Image: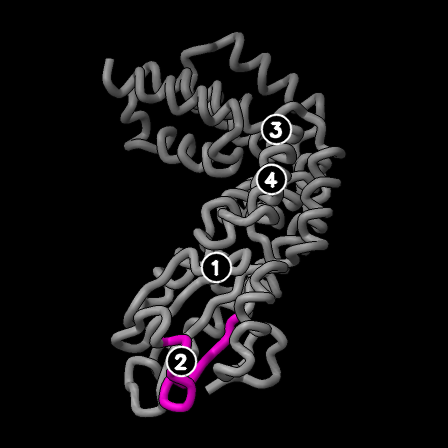
Amino acid sequence: MTDTASLNIKDTTDQDFMADVVEASENQPVIVDFWAPWCGPCRTLGPIIEKAVDARGGQVKLVKINIDENPAYAGQLGVRSIPAVYAFDKGRPVDAFMGALPEGQINAFIDKLLSGTDAGKMLAEALEQAEAASQAGDIGTAAQIYAAILQQEPENVTALAGLARCYLANGDKERAEATLEMVPEDKRNDSAVKGVRTAIDMMGDDAAAPDEFEEALSAVLADPDNHDQRFDLAEKYAAAGRFGDAIDHLLIILSAGLDWKEGKAKEKLLQMFEAAGATDPATVSGRRRLASLMFA
């Protein structure tokens, strides 16, 4: 059942269980899949859990054991039905599930396992530091942290999206797009990835020149109730990556009428939130201000 080409997956026996599972889990988490050739659900679960483990790029190992041929440790762990999956960390079992779970639940099981490890905690801290640096405007530091994370975990979606956003902040759309191409196909609907993609789509190749901004802003200041002009200015700001300014002007339009142009401004505002990113101060403040308008 095992893909022998994978370095992250192997079959084992009762004789090698201590070395392949207990001792190996001192260095990284090990998932043990107890199965048998006659078990239909085992055949369903096997390829799913193998794919999920391989997708972690070596962060976790999968060891498979045929209980018909190797019943000892299954008996010690109290396995009464199969498939039975146990997670080991630091030499002891820390979690388990029975039956053929769907892919989403298997991924959640592995994510929970990894988040409890020292490496998982360090990764979470590094991502928090990168996000904090980015929000503080220290794009260089944020990019360095994201790049370091990706050296250890090349398919980390949060780091890929974060690095792409750093490139975008420096006006480098081409490298931002290239970075998003590195996101695994099955993770391209991640909210962070979609947010950067929206930002790229909004930031056109023909961003307004400084004098065009001055002209558009002067027109809005001269006629503040002309919301068509204000909407055009918001789009110019968005094309330049200035999502905070765009959000401010769209909220001014919405303060005069939430249904302006049949919801055109509100729809654009929600796109701005996505493009700026959920944790961007402009998004956080903008959502709060929008809620105040909607429930005033």
Instruction: Please rate how many residues cluster around mark 3, counting C-alpha atoms within 10 Å: few if below 14, some from 14 to 19, many from 20.
Output: some
The stretch of residues the image draws in magenta is 62-74
Q: Nearer the viewer, mark 2 or mark 3?
A: 2
Q: Secondary structure at mark 4?
A: helix
Q: Is residue 69 left or right of residue 293?
A: right
Q: Which residue is mark 3?
A: 132
Q: Residue at the location (61% across, 28% down)?
A: 132
Was residue 64 drawn as part of the magenta stretch in this picture? yes
Was residue 68 drawn as part of the magenta stretch in this picture? yes
Above or below, 166 relative to 98: above
Residue type at tag 4: Leu
Residue 72 circle label: 2
Instruction: Give how far across and how far down residue 208 sits, in percent.
Output: 66, 31
Q: Secondary structure at mark 1?
A: strand
Question: Which of pointers 4 and 2 lies earlier in the amino acid sequence?
Answer: 2
Instruction: Please rate how many residues cluster around mark 4, counting C-alpha atoms within 10 Å: few if below 14, some from 14 to 19, many from 20.
Output: some
Q: Nearer the viewer, mark 3 or mark 1?
A: 1
Q: Which quadrant: the C terminus? A: top left
Q: What's the CA distance linking mark 4 and mark 3?
A: 9 Å
Above or below, 88 relative to 150: below
Q: Is residue 92 left or right of residue 125?
A: left
Instruction: Please rate how many residues cluster around mark 2, counting C-alpha atoms within 10 Å: few if below 14, some from 14 to 19, many from 20.
Output: some
Residue 127 circle label: 4
Above or below, 31 relative to 217: below
Instruction: Give how far across and how far down residue 261 sits, in percent.
Output: 32, 29
Residue 92 circle label: 1
The answer to which image quadrant residue 43 occupies is bottom left
Q: Are marks 2 and 1 in contact (CB under 8 Å)?
A: no
- Regarding residue 212, the answer to whether it shows in the image is yes
Number of callouts: 4
Residue 38 circle label: none
